[in-house]
């Protein structure tokens, strides 16, 4: 009987725990990609990195091999966020086509990005009376699609519970990717970028 409990204790301590965490960096990268796509901004080319000499590569490989003898390497998959599903593609396409109508409203200061990443009509009185209903409809449609997009991304990644974290990540990225002259909320007040 004692052998079984010692064996059981050994097996319990040998278990590996895998934590499923929210991939914040991947979410930021995905948010930037989606936002820039919606706004029609092409990705910037990065400068080529300086290459290592053959001697430096050989030294790094030798050091890596020596460390691997002492410490067993653990391989973890790079965190990634799936942003490609039929629902996500449809939402992105709709938001991209709507952006042409929203852009002049951003530029005129009629609408701004709230701290939660949703749009708001900043000063309804400044919007010409004939355009108010259209502006309100555009803002409401955009906000509904943004909420749906966050949930669709969470669902596509098998974690519907991530929707709030995705929304929070996108909120910061919408503001960060705002174009000069656009308005956004910070600490409860409107500021112009």
Image: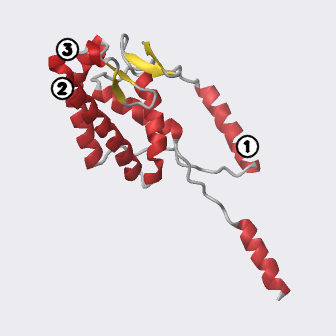
The picture places residue 164, in percent across and down from the top left corner, at: 46, 43
Residues at marks 3 and 1, CA–CA distance in whole angstroms = 71 Å
**Residue 176 to residue 168: above or below:** above
Q: Given contact means CB atoms under 8 Å apart, are the residues at marks 2 and 3 in contact?
A: no
Q: Which of the pair 166/67 is nearer the observer? A: 166
Tell which tag, 3 or 1, sits nearer the viewer: 3
Q: Earlier in the sequence, mark 2 or mark 3?
A: 3
Residue 192 visible, this angle? yes
Q: Residue at x 35, y 41 (%)?
A: 147
For the C terminus, the image quarter is top left
Q: Earlier in the sequence, mark 1 or mark 2?
A: 1
According to the picture, the residue beneath numbered tag 1 turns out to be 66
According to the picture, the residue beneath numbered tag 2 turns out to be 134
Residues at marks 2 and 3, CA–CA distance in whole angstroms = 10 Å
The picture places residue 4, in percent across and down from the top left corner, at: 78, 84
Q: Given contact means CB atoms under 8 Å apart, are the residues at marks 3 and 1 in contact?
A: no
According to the picture, the residue beneath numbered tag 3 turns out to be 128
The colour mode here is secondary structure
The picture places residue 13, in percent across and down from the top left corner, at: 75, 67
Q: Residue at x 38, y 52 (%)?
A: 155
Left or right, 179 with reference to 129? right
**Residue 13 to residue 142: above or below:** below
């Amino acid at each position: 009987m004692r052998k079984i409990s010692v064996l059981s204790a050994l097996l319990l301590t040998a278990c590996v725990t895998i934590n499923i965490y929210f991939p914040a960096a991947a979410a930021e990268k995905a948010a930037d990609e989606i936002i820039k796509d919606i706004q029609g901004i092409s990705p910037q080319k990065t400068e080529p990195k300086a290459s290592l000499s053959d001697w430096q590569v050989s030294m790094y490989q030798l050091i890596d091999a020596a460390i691997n003898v002492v410490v067993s390497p653990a391989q973890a998959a790079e965190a990634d966020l799936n942003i490609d599903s039929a629902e996500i593609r449809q939402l992105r396409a709709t938001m991209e086509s709507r952006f042409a109508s929203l852009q002049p409203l951003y530029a005129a200061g009629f609408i701004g990005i709230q701290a939660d990443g949703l749009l708001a009509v900043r000063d309804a009185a400044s919007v010409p009376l004939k355009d108010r209903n259209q502006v309100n409809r555009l803002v409401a449609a955009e906000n509904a699609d943004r909420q749906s997009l966050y949930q669709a991304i969470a669902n596509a990644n098998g974690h519907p519970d991530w929707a709030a974290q995705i929304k929070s990540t996108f909120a910061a990225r919408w503001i960060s990717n705002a174009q000069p002259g656009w308005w956004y909320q910070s600490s409860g007040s409107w500021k112009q970028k």
